[in-house]
Image (tube, rainbow, N blue to C red):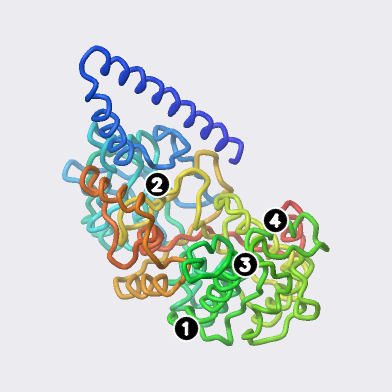
Amino acid sequence: MTARKQQLLKRHRRHKRIALLVALVVLALAGVLLAWWLVPLLLLLGWIAHEAWFADHLFYAPGDDYRYHFPPGTPRLAATLESDGRLRLDEPLPPGETLILELRIEATLLGRLCDPQVWIGADRQDFERGVAGLRYLNLSGQREALERGELRLRGRFCRLAASGALLVLENPDYAQQRLMVVAPHADDAELAAFGLYSRAAEASIVTLTQGEIEADGYRRLGLDATAAARLKGRLRSWDSLAVPLWGGVGQQRCVQLGYYCLQLPAMAAEPAQPFGSRESGETDIRSARRHNPLPLPGDADGQPNWHNLVADLVALLEHFRPEVLVTPHPELDPHADHVAATRALHEAVARSAWKPSTLLLYANHLHDNDRWPMGPAEGGIALPPAIEALPADGLWSPTLDAAVRLDKAMALAMQHDLQGRLPAKKRLRRAIQRVLAGRRWPATGEDEFFRKAVRRHELFWVRPLSGHAAVGAKARAGI
């Protein structure tokens, strides 16, 4: 996936350079042949057009099909879209709460300027401008309307194929099992799984890093770079312990391990070598562990190394005894700390006397589309781009009612890293997109995650943990 992303990124940049060169030639000709004042006017109009329609980071072709494989035996039902938009199935709907509709979508001419939308009853799921390929709509929560033959689909700025296939995936309610949510940084647990952990019978949350880097915003308080990073690390460590209480998870079930942001991959490469903070100057993880509810192996020497991280996770597995682990998707979420977090967890499971049964994998970032989930807050979550096929995992997509969505938004608002004003350039870009492209952002917060994460669904890939040998093989493979 990384190689393909690099190829697409090179192509994207090449196309932009060609477009810029053509634009400069046109501007020069306009200035020479028509009038000099056309040059600044056309420059302004070109910049506005770029901000409105061409500023998205999309590193694949909108005409590419998404490629998903599902576990063997997953029911796949032929589905037909009637002339009035009703979705009809040719056979009875088997048991299963997670419903995914595979359907071909093609943007209209306006769908190259405005976001193509598919309305599923009262739900809305958006796709890439210029979309022309196979996509996967999330119909979870719509089962009753579908069984009654009352579920209607309609496209706006796009055309929907007359036929598709419905995938039906059946899962237990994992909220009724003991959960451990692994968060590489404060806020990852809330972004991915607030709805899940806030209704769980028994949940624990383990945050691996302090999240102290990129602290320039705190320098306005008169702090130098080192002091700003230390303050940010303290605040985000506090967030990781305090915010889960809003979702019913008390401090006695929250742990902050205190490792340093963006150092997990280096730790994995040299397991015995300590890696201190890049910005705060700190090298002892015990400074962030004062409020943890239990002692851990890394407390002995405070060294930020891989051996301590894995030993800490082993101790937490054996203490909390989770049946289900919630952790970043190692093939889909490219953030280096996220990949390393799941790798460390696999190694810990392989070494632990306690063996969970299930992984629920989440993605808070993507390789090639920084807007997914696309569309406004409160809509559903369609499956993300998979231009290269992912492992054939199951899917579980629980629904969040309006009250839980509001609580989730407020949990995000408590996170220090998601607070504050956007830079002026981004505010101006949003104003242009609001007027010219019809995009909307929620009132709950300015950070993009308030739009991305507060949705009708949460989405998890389901991967069984089938014993010590399989887990150890995954750990050795670095996944």
**Which tag, 3 or 2, sits closer to the chain's start?**
2
Marks 3 and 2 sit apart, C-alpha to C-alpha, by 46 Å
Which residue is tagged 4?
265
Marks 1 and 2 sit apart, C-alpha to C-alpha, by 35 Å
The kind of secondary structure element at disc 2 is strand
User: Relative to residue 74, is residue 258 drawn left or right?
Assistant: right
Which amino acid, by three-letter code, is at mark 3?
Thr
Which residue is tagged 3?
226
The residue closer to the viewer here, 336 or 133, is 336
Which residue is tagged 2?
136
The residue closer to the viewer here, 345 or 437, is 437
- Tell me, for residue 245, which label it has, or none: 1
Closer to viewer: mark 1 or mark 2: 1
Label 1 near label 4: C-beta < 8 Å? no
**Which tag, 1 or 2, sits closer to the chain's start?**
2
Which amino acid, by three-letter code, is at mark 1?
Leu
The kind of secondary structure element at disc 4 is helix
Marks 3 and 4 sit apart, C-alpha to C-alpha, by 22 Å
Marks 2 and 4 sit apart, C-alpha to C-alpha, by 32 Å
Farthest-out residue, right: 272
Q: Position of residue 247 (x, y in %)?
A: 44, 80
Which amino acid, by three-letter code, is at mark 2?
Tyr
